[in-house]
Amino acid sequence: MVPTNYYIILSAILFGLGILAFIFKRNIITIFMAIELMLNAVNLAFVAFSRALGKPDGEVFVLFVIVVAAAEAAVGLGIIILTARNRRSLNVERVDLLKL
Amino acid sequence: MTASLVIFFVLATVTVLAAISLIVQRHPIHGALSLIVVMVALAGLYLLMGAEFVAAVQIIVYGGAIMVLFVFVIMLLNDGEEERTNFSKLATFAGIPLAVAVAGLIGAAVVHSSSSLPAATANATLTSTKTISLLIFTEFVYPFELTSFLILVAILGAIVLAQREDN
């Protein structure tokens, strides 16, 4: 019997680590992977609450989140390839076209 | 300490260590491999809760399809190690407090409401794959159809983005 709190706290820790990776990494692919880490943390909370409350709705939401993550990965990686082709670099500090 | 608690702590340790490894590693391919470890360990946690369909989808779609896409793009671009630049002061002064605040806020809220939630246990009758599919095709049929439209748009977007300009 694992208490639901443990799952939610693990989910919070993972989400915090995702924020840290998102802010501190310079490689655009790693930043994208940090977003996936945060989505995974949210999925864990969804499943834990779904099991605790006895309703399967949360697991259906997880499936929707996974679908959105897959669509996001396809489009996002396309954008990354375009940026790398134009800028010859994956460092986000070199992508400053909109900077004044 | 029961067996499920031991399994939970082993999987949780693996997950957190691999997530820390994602931050520490300098090369993106090492980060991608760490993320795959996170996803497989999370699938183990889903199995521990008895959500076997979500665990299978997690491994097939996340650990399989999405991460293969990432590894493939890293291989294509062949970028090498992350270079150190003098990153902004804002990241140092706002980043760590923000992450600690978010995790701490959620943790504090969970600890305060500890008694009201029952344990997340494996309950075979609760969410079999049949229950989930029934829900998808009855109550959630409209969002389900919308996701298929979303995937269609994403495919079109990826094709347009990947097209070469010069022809």
Image (spheres, rainbow, N blue to C red):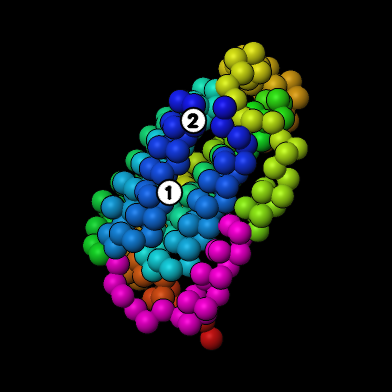
Give the alpha-carbon distance from disc 1 to disc 2, as whole Å: 21 Å
**In contact (CB < 8 Å): disc 1 and disc 2:** no
Mark nearer the viewer, 1 or 2: 2
Which sits earlier in the primary sequence, circle 1 or circle 2? 2
Q: Main secondary structure of the magenta part?
A: helix
**Which of the numbered marks, if any, corresponds to residue A82?**
none
Looking at the image, which residue is at 60% across and 35% down? A3
Kindly identify which chain the residue marked by label 1 belongs to.
Answer: B
Q: Position of residue B93 (x, y in %)?
A: 52, 78
**Which of the numbered marks, if any, corresponds to residue B1?**
2
Q: Is residue B27 above or below residue B95?
A: above
Q: Is residue B131 above or below residue A4?
A: above
**Which of the numbered marks, if any, corresponds to residue B16?**
1
Examine the structure image and report whether residue A53 is included in the region drawn in magenta.
Answer: no
Name the secondary structure under disc 2.
loop
Q: Confirm whether circles 1 and 2 share one chain.
A: yes
The quarter of the image holding the C terminus of chain B is bottom left
Whether residue B64 is visible to the viewer of this picture, yes or no, is yes
The kind of residue on which mark 2 rests is: Met
Q: Residues within 10 Å of mark 1 (few under 14, many from 20)?
A: some
Q: Is residue B30 above or below residue B131?
A: below
Which is nearer the eye, B159 or A22? A22
**Left or right position of A40 against B111:** left
Q: Quadrant of residue B137?
A: top right
Whether residue A72 is visible to the viewer of this picture, yes or no, is no
Q: Is residue A96 above or below residue B33?
A: below
Q: Position of residue B73 (x, y in %)?
A: 33, 51
